[in-house]
Image (cartoon, helix red, strand yellow):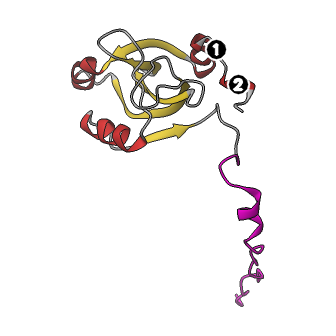
Amino acid sequence: MLPVIAERVNIMDQDVALGITMTITQADFPYLRDAGRLGEYAVVYRCYRTQAGGGFGDQDKHPFAWGVLAYVDGAVARIYSARGLPREWTDLTRLEKWMRDQGFWYWWMRNDLEPLGQNTPDSEIDDFPPAELPELTPPLQTGK
C-alpha cells in the first residue's frame, strides 16, 4: 500500500516549495548557455508523475518520476518538453545520458517525496555489526 503522499497532488505545491519561478525547454539551453545565463549545474529531483506510460503506466504503483531544474539568471527553472509538459524520467541511467547530452557535467540530486530508509529491510540492516571506531589519539606535542 502506498503512503498517503502518493495520492494525486497539485504539482504547483512542490514547485512553490522548491522555489521554481519559470519553465524552459531544452531548446533554450544553447541560447542561454551562449549568453552566460544558464547555471553550471542542474538539480535532478523526485517529482509526482504527470504523464502516464513509459513502461511504468500504473500511476498507483509508480507515482513518482525524476525531473530536472536548471538555474537561469540565478532563478530556478523547471525543464519542460516542447509539448508543454514537464520533462520526466523513470530511469536515472537515461536521465544521466540526457544530462550529459545537454552539456551538464555535474548536478545535485534530491528526493523529498519518499521516506528515508524504506528501501532496505530491517533484517539487512541488522546483519551488519556496529562499526568499531578507531581510538583517537591527540597529536604529539613537539618541544619548542
Disc 2 marks a residue whose amino acid type is: Ile
Location of the N terminus by quadrant is: top right
Of residue 37 and residue 52, the one placed in the foreground of this image is 52
* Residue drawn at (37%, 44%) of the image: 93
Are discs 2 and 1 less than 8 Å apart at CB? yes
Q: Main secondary structure of the magenta part?
A: loop
Q: Which residues are magenta?
A: 117-144
* Residue drawn at (72%, 90%) of the image: 143
Residue 124 is inside the magenta segment: yes
Query: In the figure, residue 86 lies in which quadrant?
Result: top left
Location of the C terminus by quadrant is: bottom right
The residue that disc 1 covers is 9
Left or right: 134 with respect to 71?
Answer: right
* Residue drawn at (72%, 72%) of the image: 128
On screen, residue 114 above or below 36: below
> x, y (%) of residue 12?
58, 11
Query: In the figure, residue 102 lies in which quadrant?
Result: top left
> x, y (%) of residue 64?
55, 29
Query: In the figure, residue 72 lies in which quadrant?
Result: top left
